[in-house]
Amino acid sequence: MRASFRKLTLCLFSITTLLIVGCSSDELETEPMELESFDEEIEIIEVWDESIGSGSDGQYLKITPIIIDEFIYAIDHEGLLVALNKRDGDEVWDKEYDEPVSGALGGDFNHLYFATYHGDIIAVDRLDGTEKWRFTVTSEVLSAPVSNGRQVVVQSIDGKIVGLNATDGKLMWRYDSNAPVLSIRGTATPVISDDFTVAGFANGEMMAFQNLSGAPAWSVSVGIPKGRTELERLVDIDGQPIIRDDVVYSVSYQGKLVAIHLPTGREIWSKQQSSYRAVDIGFGNVYVSTAEDVVVAYNMATRTEVWKQENLMYRQLTAPKAFGSILVVADFEGYVHFLSQIDGRFLERIHIDSDGVRAPMLIDDDMLFIFSNSGELAAYKIAP
């Protein structure tokens, strides 16, 4: 039996909460907050929008596009891969792979990479989408393959991570983590630098690996399981770590927000927090969308709370993204909320898709890119 079936994953995410409705006898009363009116302070302009097939096709997936050079690449759940000019949305090429896609797009200057439900990692030419190689891992992949142009690193939901040669897909190294019995359905996307790959696991461990050999460089506990039940002991790291100035920032579910020195693995600071999304950085702050969908800003240097926005609770927010002087989050009803990075107040709100937004948003120069659950890919700017 495949490892993915031996591992029990959460029967995720009702409309009202991320937590285990249907898996637990104690259902939580977590109705999403009603949106309140406010005085708009900025104007958001849609630059272009394009439909990319069926999007996530009703599946709980975070199929995220990728921007490389002057192009944005997107794929849908059914395997439609499209290359667009990021400035005007004009299609450059498209390619249909009749395979169910489960993970987000990765890429480098030569290839794009995506994963199927069957555990196939497929590399295609970035110029025309022609398949170059494929490698089969031991389980389903829900995160994006990441590459520095030499290695491709892929993490599967059974707690395994592999390093592949970017040119031919041959296995360079493999690491098996101690996967817990129960976990949130999702996997943190690793982050790769020239020397290290940093990955977070469902057991609450964040690890750095030497890119060439896969040898572990260090390990840090971002979440330590506590409690008697498996639900209480969930400590998944499901959001991609972020690296700035040799510091790794990450957060775990029912764990903590941490700042780690990349070369040594030394903990610089930590703060009790719970989130299953990636963090972002801006204006000297680290931003978190918590498990209860409170948006919180922490000072990067002192770890003190700067502000929090509680008026979006239980709206199933995306990971926050710093966009100029603004912080952006989207929700399950397809509303995109623009907050001030200074104090967290609402500046603007737009609605883009009644099917909602789950995939992390992308920022490139002065443009914000959002890929909705139904497959609408749109680019936005802040009006001058």
Image: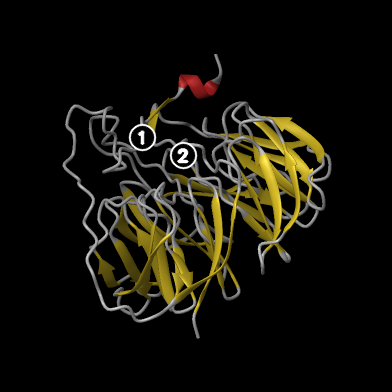
Foreground mark, 2 or 1? Answer: 1
Q: Residue at x 63, y 41 (%)?
A: 154
Amino acid of disc 2: Gly
Residue 142 vertical position relative to residue 272 in the rendered view, above or below: above
Q: Position of residue 143 (x, y in %)?
A: 56, 43
Res. 193 in view: no
Q: Verify CB contact (< 8 Å) between mark 2 and mark 1.
A: yes
Circle 2: element type: loop
Q: Position of residue 346 (x, y in %)?
A: 31, 73
Q: Is residue 80 left or right of residue 320?
A: right
Question: In which quarter of the view is residue 244 placed?
Answer: bottom right
Q: Residues within 10 Å of mark 2 (few under 14, many from 20)?
A: many
Cα–Cα gap, marks 2 and 1: 10 Å
Res. 71 in view: yes
Residue on which the image places disc 1: 12
Q: Residue at x 72, y 38 (%)?
A: 96
Q: Is residue 301 left or right of residue 227?
A: right
Viewer-proximal residue, 170 or 209? 170
Residue on which the image places disc 2: 186
Residue 47 vertical position relative to residue 142 in the rendered view, above or below: below
Residue 30 vertical position relative to residue 365 in the rendered view, above or below: above
Circle 1: element type: loop
Q: Quadrant of the N terminus?
A: top right
Q: Position of residue 28 (x, y in %)?
A: 18, 39
Q: Residue at x 32, y 42 (%)?
A: 18
Q: Is residue 46 left or right of residue 285?
A: right
Amino acid of disc 1: Leu
Question: In which quarter of the view is residue 50 placed?
Answer: bottom right
